[in-house]
Each structure stands twice: as C-alpha cells, then as structure tokens.
Amino acid sequence: MDIIKTGNLKKSYMLGKVEVKALNGVDVSIQKGEFVAIMGPSGCGKSTFLNMVGMLDIPTSGEIYVEGNDVTGMSSNKRAEYRLRHIGFIFQFFNLFNELTAIENIMFPMMLNRMPNYRKNAQELLNLVGLGDRIHHLPSELSGGQQQRVTIARSLANSPKILLADEPTGNLDTKSSKEIIELFRKLNLERGQTIVMVTHSQEIGEKADRIIHFRDGIIEK
C-alpha cells in the first residue's frame, strides 16, 4: 500500500527575475513501513520534496496523496490538523523548547492533541529512545545526540503514521549519527514505522531500505 504518492509534482519560485524550478515533475511512491533515504547534491530538491509531502508548503502543480488522501487542495487549517495527527518531523537542528525539560518537550504535542495519560506516554517514549534517566534534564544539559533522541521521541508523541527526517544527523558527530540511525532502524523494524529521511551521507543513506536520488528537481533513473 502506498502511504505517500506524488504525481508530476512541481514547485517553482522566483529568485529576483529568475524562475527556479525546485521540483520539476516528481513521481514517487513510498510503501507503508518503508525506510527510504532521499539523497542528492545541495539544491536538488530533497528538502523541498519533504516539505511538500509533509504539508509544510504547497506545490505549484501536481498531486500529493498521503494514506490515500489527496492533501494537495487542503486548507491551511486542515493541513495543520493532519500534520499534528499523522506526521512526525525531525530536523537537523533540534527545535526543542529550551525552558522545558525532556519529558515536558514530549508532553507538549500530546497536550495540544488532548491525549490522555500524556505523562506516562512521554515517559515510555523516553525509555524507548534510551533516555529514561534524563526526563528532568533541560536541553542545555543534554548532548547533541541526546537532544536529537528527545526530538525523535517528541516526533512519536501522537503516534504518527509517517516520520519525515531532514538531515537528522547533520549536526552530530560520527558516533551520535550512528546511534540515531540505529534508532531509526529499530523503530522501522520493531514498530513498522514509515520513515522518509533526507541525507547527504552515503553511509547513512545505505542504512535505509532504498535510496531515491534527486538531481536538478527530478529523480535520477
């Protein structure tokens, strides 16, 4: 079953008087439970594609289906609600609330979504990512790798069908990068989590089930 499908997806914008085609007709199918890496040189459209399927931006033309739903024409409010309930995001920079502890950072989206037992569930997610003993630590008291683990736990707070990760190891050292990818693989294998990950690293990309190569806004065949 396709959990993500795009048809002739295009995204253009103006840079001064020059039209830049960030995506120029992208057809992608990603199956439920796949772990897919998106790779290619800087400016090839990788992050733009992730933003499109994550409904953080809207395409110039083309179609996007998520879980069989045509999300292309959704209103901004419906896109925001769908993201909150169905998609988890992980970025290169951790985007944690500096004044909140690890467990409070994870509880926050649960509270927005009015989930019951949010403290218990947040504790379980911290245990899952190996930080059960760091629940009361602020981000400033955690290493980069630990902060990214908190970010991953937070991305799982609302049990999303899809995890979208944009350069999740780009701000980490080699050891921490390997630990994060091992955690992704664990989530994929043990929980059946669908993961779409943008990366520049061939070594990291090869940990995925398959690699989709972008270049100049299209998919390399």
Image: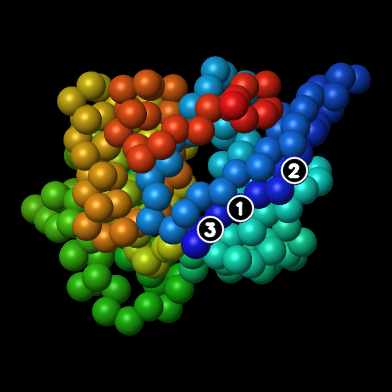
CA distance separating discs 2 and 3: 16 Å
User: Which amino acid type is shown beneath numbered disc 3?
Assistant: Asp
Q: Which residue corresponds to the image point at 9% horizontal and 53% vertical from the top-left?
A: 133
Horizontal side of 100 relative to 41 (left or right) equals left
Q: Where is residue 105 in the image (x, y as percent from the top left)?
A: 33, 56
Q: Tell me how far mark 3 sits from mark 1, CA to CA.
A: 6 Å
Measured as percent of width and height from the top left, residue 163 is found at 42, 52
Q: What residue type is labelled 2?
A: Asn
Residue designated by label 2: 8
The answer to the question of whether label 3 and label 1 lie on touching residues, with beta carbons closer than 8 A, is yes
Q: Position of residue 5 (x, y in %)?
A: 61, 53
Residue nearest the viewer, comparing 96 with 1: 1
Task: Relative to 99, say whether 113 is above or below.
Answer: below
Q: Is residue 120 visible?
A: yes
Of labels 2 and 3, earlier in sequence is 3
Q: Residues within 10 Å of mark 3 (few under 14, many from 20)?
A: some
Give the residue type that dot 1 points to.
Lys
Q: Which element is circle 2 on?
A: strand
What element does badge 3 sit on?
Answer: strand
Dot 1 corresponds to which residue?
A: 5
Whether pointer 2 and pointer 3 mark residues with C-beta atoms closer than 8 Å, the reply is no
**Could you tell me which residue is drawn at 15 percent across and 50 percent down?**
131
Q: Is residue 22 left or right of residue 166?
A: right
**Which quarter of the rendering shows the C terminus?**
top right
Provide the residue designation for mark 3.
2
